[in-house]
Amino acid sequence: MKYIKLIISTLLVCGLFYFLNYQHGRLPPLGKLLNPSAGFWQNNTSGDKVPEELDVPGLKDEVQVLFDDRHVPHIFAKNSHDLYFAQGYITARDRLWQMEMQTHLAAGRLSEILGKSAIETDRYHRRLGLLYGAENTLKAMLADPESRAAGEAYAEGVNAFIHMLNYKSLPLEYKILDYQPEEWTALKSTLILKLMSLTLSSYNREASMSTTREALGDAVMDELFPIYPLFPEPIIPAGSPWNFDAKIPEKPENEFRFNKGAVYAPDEEKASPGSNNWAVSSDLTSTGYPILCNDPHLGLSLPSIWYEIQLAAPDINVYGVTFPGVPTVIIGFNENVAWGYTNAGSDVFDWYALKFQDKNRKKYFYDGQWRPVSTRIEKIKVRNGPNVEDQVIYTHHGPVVYTDSKSSLFKNIPPGCALRWTAHDPSNDFLMFLKLNRAQNYDEYVHALSFFDCPAQNIVFADMSGDIAIWHNGKFPLRWPGQGRYISDGSDSNYDWQGWVPRADIPHIKNPERGFVSSANQEPTDSSYPYYLGSSYGSFTRPARINERLIEMKDISPDDMRRLQIDTLDLKARAILPGLSILMEEQKLTPAEKAAFKKIKLWNFKFLAELIEPTIFEYWWRELANIIWSDELEHPDGQLNRPGTNVTLDLIINKPDSPYFDIKTTEEKESLKELTFLSFKAAIQKLTERFGSMDESWTWGKARGTDINHLARIPGLNRKNLETNGNSGIVNATSLTFGPSWRMIVALGPELKAWGIYPGGQSGNPGSKFYDNMIDDWAAGKIYEVHFLKKPEIKEEHLSGKTRLRGAK
């Protein structure tokens, strides 16, 4: 009996030990996680305090790092190797888990961490060719001595930090998800850029556009989906001359038509929430020097997508933000120039319908012959499960992402079609960042831009000499007008990309007469530009408002620019609300509806968190757009593509007798007047059902709000229900999960001044006071003056720590 008790006790202890030290499903190993000496308790404030000296193997000389009062590192090195080594080391110290998680996502390796639940996501990213494209970019990066040296030094710095870690010092997420970091490589840095290419250049609706064309016909498509937008507000001012001869490919006589009944209509406004940039000339500013502003709007997350940093060495002194995991500063300034980005939106992503010889898909038909495919074997390791081997077919166009609809994870990917995407091509995008960081004038800025291909960007510029400029920059295929709007014929070489728009011919302007340059994701040019670049650009509302305000301003100060960045006036509401108010049959409304209508009639069109009116208008606009288009776009397989905001506004403002206002399912013939009434009543009904009677719960900040989620959606590590101003289509384009990811203002001059803020904090450690310390000020529209140091010295009240990194002997 004594031995039986001993055996049972031993088994219980072993079972408890096993339970506490190993992961069980999504439950982390609680023994390790709750261990007071090494578990999550040690992540409470770790990293906020930095040792005065650190021995770091791999450095060639001593590096000084000062952390200011927001934990921004100011790195001063004596050579370029040590500069990027230290950047890798310091960034990993604050953001290692984020860096690695994003590269696992891009490479299709989440299953190694999360198990079988991530297999389909991994297959999608592998089949889309993100790893394939990153490998091609790596080859170009390593072929150039400058980018190779920076990329490898950065990787060495990250690994130097990783080698110093033990379980106690691991970032919290490693403990929760129960895995260890691996060696960093330059490939991982290229993967982060490919993840941004996916975010910024893969929006497409060719499958649903093809089905919509078959249902509605070419004439209706030209009316509802015009190639050149209504209410034009081009980046390059209308009427600008084009001093080149363009060679445009000829459109095939009998255009290919594809329709397999697949319908997926992406929401145009949700797909592109927006970014803004502009630069104003010295003639318009109170300082007598240019001012440059940028606020890229991206998905909001914790840790933040950006990491703020200063990099200084004998040949460089640059400040701004970077992607954690990527060497250099991405958006920023040095002592002589400043630059920033908005997404270009031009089309570099095409689908090609293929004809395979048989079900084995070993050959495809092209120009009268059967061509062999190539295959790429993707081996996906799965945690606590059997590994998955996936075979991806490649053609000369690119990968066949999905061969049939059953295996497709995303409905906008047409099965059996090959993908042509510039993100797959070799390109040394890192070289642009390296050269922009050191640029001293306009010519060096233009030279730097020549190395960047994808994702295409509107890159704004200003310098100390007074030059301002903007380039719609990227690698753009030569097309006939409209090519790529629909799925193309993969068996006919006439549908292949016929070369590239020459770099000198891509849209750009320097020192325009109006005294400023600006962009907000709209069309790059007016209709006189000879090359076709695409047709899925943002609405006119943000760029028109920016230009309207800049034209009005005189003696512009940095604070004027701050107020413009957080401008909340909605041009859409200003354009249609007065007319809709006249049409409203107010006497037919209920008392509750009349109270809501009275409020919105007196509204100033501003989306402020404390107002009820923006909520009423937003719901009303959605109901009005739905009632206009839902009956027009019915299809057996789902809804066809819905026209964009500009087309709907044009109908309301300029075509009040349009037949699209008639509801096809009723015997009566409705007009805009009836739809105005019906949609308003529907909006108030939905608001009442969701929030109850009109009260404080209807205010924009509470009804919409903004969430900043943790990257891994770990509960408790996020910020929810922020009461924010702005909306999609407004200069302050803050929405539920998107918004200004970095606001920057740079006032050039002999004593350069700059301001910046992003919704997060420098540390990726949820236990740190620097994890989310900037969010509340960001939501309130505040911005911080940054410390751009000329030497490693800062006032004591602005210093949170400093360290000296030394190469270990």
Image (cartoon, helix red, strand yellow):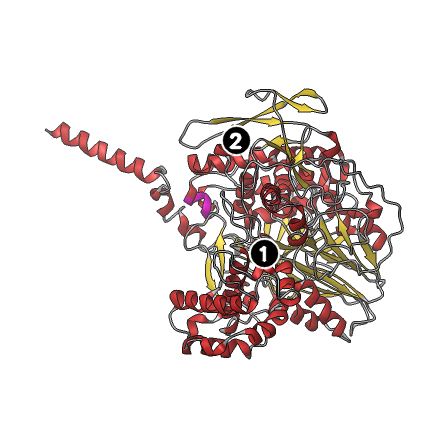
Instruction: Identify the residue at image location x=47%, y=41%.
Output: 166
Judged left or right of residue 284, residue 710 is: left
Which dot marks residue 404? Answer: 2
Amino acid of disc 1: Glu
* Farthest-out residue, left: 1
Q: Could you tell me residue 178's position as x and y percent?
A: 42, 40
With respect to residue 414, does 306 lie above or below?
Answer: below
Which quadrant of the rendered structure holds the C terminus? top right
In terms of image quadrants, where is residue 147? Answer: top right
In terms of image quadrants, where is residue 548? Answer: bottom right
Which quadrant of the rendered structure holds the N terminus? top left
Amino acid of disc 2: Asp
With respect to residue 458, does 102 lie above or below?
Answer: above
Q: For the magenta stretch, what is the residue range?
A: 172-176
Local crowd size for mark 1, using a 10 Å CA cut-off: few (<14), some (14–19), many (≥20): some
Give the mark nearer the N terminus: 2 vs 1: 1
Label 2 to label 1, Cα distance in Å? 29 Å
Instruction: Identify the residue at image location x=41%, y=55%.
Output: 716
Q: Secondary structure at mark 1?
A: helix
Q: Could you tell me residue 345's position as x and y percent?
A: 68, 50
Which dot marks residue 756? Answer: none
With respect to residue 290, does 412 lie above or below?
Answer: above
Foreground residue among 465 and 520: 520
Instruction: Identify the residue at image location x=46%, y=38%.
Output: 118
Q: Could you tell me residue 775's position as x and y percent?
A: 53, 63
Looking at the rendered structure, the number of numbered marks drawn on it comes to 2
Answer whether residue 485 is magenta in the image.
Answer: no
Q: Secondary structure at mark 2?
A: loop
Query: Which residue is the site of mark 1?
Result: 269
Foreground residue among 767 and 657: 657
Foreground residue among 318 and 344: 344
